[in-house]
Amino acid sequence: MKIIISNTSKLPIYEQIVNGIKEEIISGNLKPNEKLPSIRALARDLNISVITTKRAYEELEREGFIETVGGKGCYVSYFNKELIYEERLKEIEKKLEEILELSRGLKLSKEDIFNMINLLYEGE
Amino acid sequence: MIKLENLYKNIGDFKIEDISFELDKGYIMALIGPNGSGKTTLIKMLLGLIKADKGEIKLFDKNISEDEIYVKDNIGFVFDSLNFYPNLRVKDLKKIVGEAYSRFNSKVFDDYIKKFNINPKAYIGNLSKGEAMKIMMANALSHDAKLLILDEPTAGLDPIVRKELLSILQEEIVSGDKSVIISTHITSDIYDIADYVTFINKGKLVFSKDMEEIKDKYRIFRASREEIERSNKKFIWVKEKKYYCEALFIDEAGIEDEKTYIPSLEEIIYYYVKGEEQ
């Protein structure tokens, strides 16, 4: 598992952990039913407080990404692949809307936008 | 696990007034405040070295004045300097302090001394400040204490030793059955690792909160004097600068804009102390 915490990021540390663990689940580095490090061990290894790590795990649990099995620890949920997929789709839609908004300001046509996307797509 | 209730103490001109807070096992609490705010007095009260005039201290569900031996057996402490016979050696210190604790583990002490690269035959008087702190740490960690109390342990130490000390504290609470209370001036040291912060000023409690709440809610607002006057925020203190004003407030609504930013603990202390002076 890989989690990088940035001290210069505007995001609070707990959110950075939430995002980091989500990334690991999406990339497949963390698989469904896989055990996560304990809250206390992760806090130590990231040099952050227990309470911050706890908050991150609670948030991940609330969003359905992980589950706590009483007395045993935290595990990656089974159904989260779809969940993440949908979440990401929503994010893309939101970004596209922003693009459209910006484009309208410049009075770009649909073709102009498609051309730009095509160029970028092929450029990769 | 640790509970202080309405603590009062008069010491000459100085007073501890109505201090209460709690700490569960498995967490780190930082005790902060300016010089002379009462941090060390409070720590001495926790250690049973100063008795309260009024109020109660409960450690491990026991009253410190009723079960003194049990309570002290379960505390490991580190002060800002090692006050011990300078012409004794480290190994002699181990023998003497080891006698005082029912669960003292000589091997644990030796392992720490080795890890810290300290010669057991070294004289106490010849130790550097960092080494002296490490000896106190080794002592505090060798008798299976449930509570570690550290009074300004990082003062005057280089960043490497400070980091080492802090990661040892984090290691100690991994099991979840130990707690740490650490007083410090270098608040940046504990900003990331403290679970709770208890802030005292002039012998009174300013607040005792969890660090997430502090990071979430305390904000500094930087704007023109007019904007500050117009806003209906409740400011803890407003600092007048030549071209703008800056003020600390508790942001319940979660406003995020370019005019507010998250203060360091040092800034929080500064604004409260200044606010109190006026």
Image (cartoon, coloured by chain):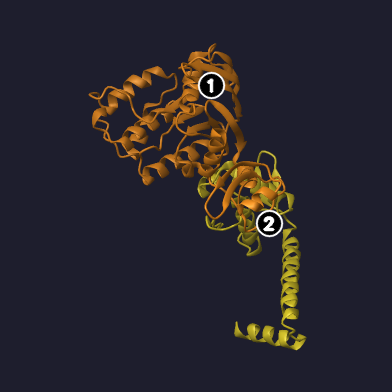
Q: Which mark is residue A32?
A: 2
Chain at numbered mark 1: B
Q: Colour of chain A?
A: yellow
Q: Who's the residue at 45% across and 37% down the image?
A: B185
Q: Who's the residue at 37% across and 21% down the image?
A: B98
Q: Residues within 10 Å of mark 2 (few under 14, many from 20)?
A: some
Question: Does B93 sit left or right of B72 as displayed?
Answer: left
Question: Does A9 sit left or right of B94 as displayed?
Answer: right
Give the Cα separation between the discs numbered 2 and 1: 54 Å
Q: What residue is pinned by disc 1?
A: B16
Q: Which mark is residue A106?
A: none
Rendered orange, the chain in question is B
Q: Who's the residue at 36% across and 40% down the image?
A: B157
Asked if residue A75 is positioned above or below residue B165 in the image, the reply reads below
In front of the other: B97 or B162: B162
SS under mark 2: loop
Quarter assignment of residue A124: bottom right
Asked if residue A2 is positioned above or below residue B104 in the image, the reply reads below
Task: Say which of marks 2 and 1 sits in front.
Answer: 1
Question: Where is residue B249 drawn, in percent x and y?
Answer: 63, 44
Q: Who's the residue at 65% across and 50% down the image?
A: B228
Q: Amino acid at mark 1?
A: Ile
Question: Where is residue A4 drawn, in percent x and y?
Answer: 54, 57
> Where's the C terminus of chain B, which quadrant?
top right
Question: Where is residue B68 drawn, in percent x and y?
Answer: 50, 14
Question: Where is residue A77 drawn, in percent x and y?
Answer: 71, 54
